[in-house]
Image (cartoon, rainbow, N blue to C red):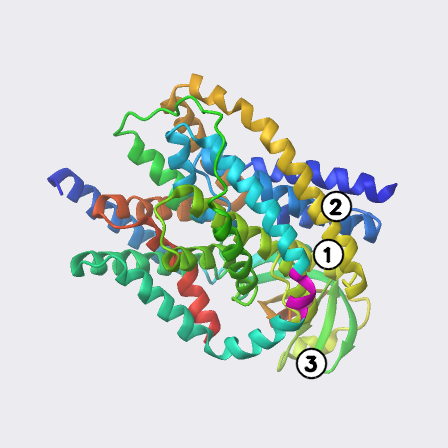
Amino acid sequence: MQLDEKKVVVAACLVAVLGIALLFLMNETPRRMNIAQALVSQENTLAEVAGTAENLTEGKFSLCDQLCISVRFSKIPSAYLLSDGRVAVVLGRIKEYRGNRYLEAERIDAK
Amino acid sequence: MIQVIALLAGILLGIFSGLVPGIHSNTIASVLSTLPIDPEAFAYIIVAVLGAHLVFQFFPSIFLSIPDDTVVASVLPGHRMALEGRGRQALAVCAFSVMLSAGASALLLPVSLVLLPIAFGAISPHMAIILVGASIYLLLSERAAGKIALAAFVFLLSGALGLATLRGAVNDPLFPSFSGLFAASGILLSFTQQRKIPRQKKESTRLDFLPYVAAGVLFGMLSDLLPGIAAPAQIAIFASAILVTDDAKKFLALVSSIAASHGVFAFAALLSIGKAREGALAIMNEIEPVMPSDLPALVGVLLVSIGVSAFLLMRLSKYADRLQQIDTKKINLLVLAYLSCAVAIISGGAGLLVFATATAIGILPPLLGIRRTHVMGLIIIPSILLSL
């Protein structure tokens, strides 16, 4: 390898490492999205999704706009303020179980 | 009548998404799901989009070196053929392989409905070990100890990028990643060389790639067992390491076949193991659950869409010669500008960061004298961790 190519390789490695580090730092920023986007997003995406709460049961409910996504939660006191038809904003990680996407809630704001 | 209109609309949308880098069939499905469309028509549109996209995505991959995530493995041999004036032949091989593979996969669909759950149950507890083993095999294929070390470095660096991007800060992370790893890095390196897309010859080709199409059908079925991070691309990389060939045409046949069979068997995966391996199918299933009785109609729509699209692609390929009249440097600059804008629009500032980082990683393999396929650590390493 010639000297200028070595410099290019070193520079590329530095750019790559720096870029990766910055991206890891940005990972903890939630992405605002609608339910359709949540249904096609990558697993483990940290998302903030708004919709209407429906079919409330112990530990889960459906969050709906034109589509619905299941939301599961535990130990989130604000979830108990929800009722059918109430608007909610859910912050959580997108997960998948048997081909179905759902939100593992970390925070629920009832509007 | 509405089904025919839906089919035609889906084909047109799929042609658009296939030709325009950055637009995926999932994007189309996501947008359409917000419109008040009859559920049956919606299903027909989505499946037709999948079929047309499957065929037309090879055009930008072969002539502009911009890969879609499903067929990223095709970009290097495909673009190589275009630079040899055999781009039309490459397109013909891809189109034919997709049609043949989709047809064969459709015939095997009833078998896959039974086999997939059994295979999934057997393989999924050991998926991480299988992926690690396959990755080590890929690295060792470099042979020289020094090159293996460099390959491992690039593989891990790409994997770190994959972990950083696939956890959510970036919208549609695979587009800026693959565009940087393959298209942008290739363009930057090409500025040091004088390469022009030559006149594209119209030449017939022998059907000696048929065994690779057959292999692709089986590997495509296997890809529906993998965790869903560009699984067809992962399987294509591993399959190419097993079925070693220097013939770009055979490699393209394999990649095309895997992509097509993955698309067909995705229906089986949805019904039998509950895994929606295509985002568009997940949305379709959410609007109205797919039942086994729907399969013949939906697979029929897919096959018609693929057939019509393959015919149209061959007609379009005649115009590939126009590329020869354009200064390659201008094309490359235009492509680079388009990719940067598309990444910025689709994925935002974070996407541009991914794009730049991926480009930096993408230029390493040619400079270090190792194969470019090691950058697929981008999706393989996250898949390994997902399987644990």
**How far, Cα to Cα, is label 3 from label 2?**
36 Å
Camera-near label (3 vs 1) is 1
Q: Determine which quarter of the picture holds residue B264.
A: bottom right
User: Would residue B49 appear left or right of B19 to someone viewing this image?
Assistant: right
Q: Residue at x 37, y 66 (%)?
A: B134
> Which amino acid, by three-letter code, is at mark 3?
Gly
In the rendered image, residue B109 lying in the magenta stretch gets the answer: yes
Quarter of the figure that contains the C terminus of chain B:
bottom left
- Whole-percent x, y for residue B157 in the image: 31, 58
Q: Residue at x 59, y 31 (%)?
A: B314
> Which amino acid, by three-letter code, is at mark 1?
Met
User: Would residue A41 appear left or right of A67 to someone viewing this image?
Assistant: left
Q: Which mark is residue B170?
A: none
Question: What chain does badge 3 belong to?
Answer: A
- Binning the other alpha carbons within 10 Å of mark 1 as few (below 14), some (14 to 19) or many (20 upward) gives many
User: Would residue B170 appear left or right of B279 to someone viewing this image?
Assistant: left
Q: Which residues are magenta?
A: B108-113
> Which amino acid, by three-letter code, is at mark 2?
Ile
Whether residue B71 is visible, yes or no, is yes
The residue nearer to you, when weighing A109 against B242, is: B242
Extreme-right residue of the structure: B1
* SS label for mark 3: loop
Q: Which mark is residue B284?
A: 1
The residue to which callout 2 is attached is B45
Q: Which mark is residue A59?
A: 3
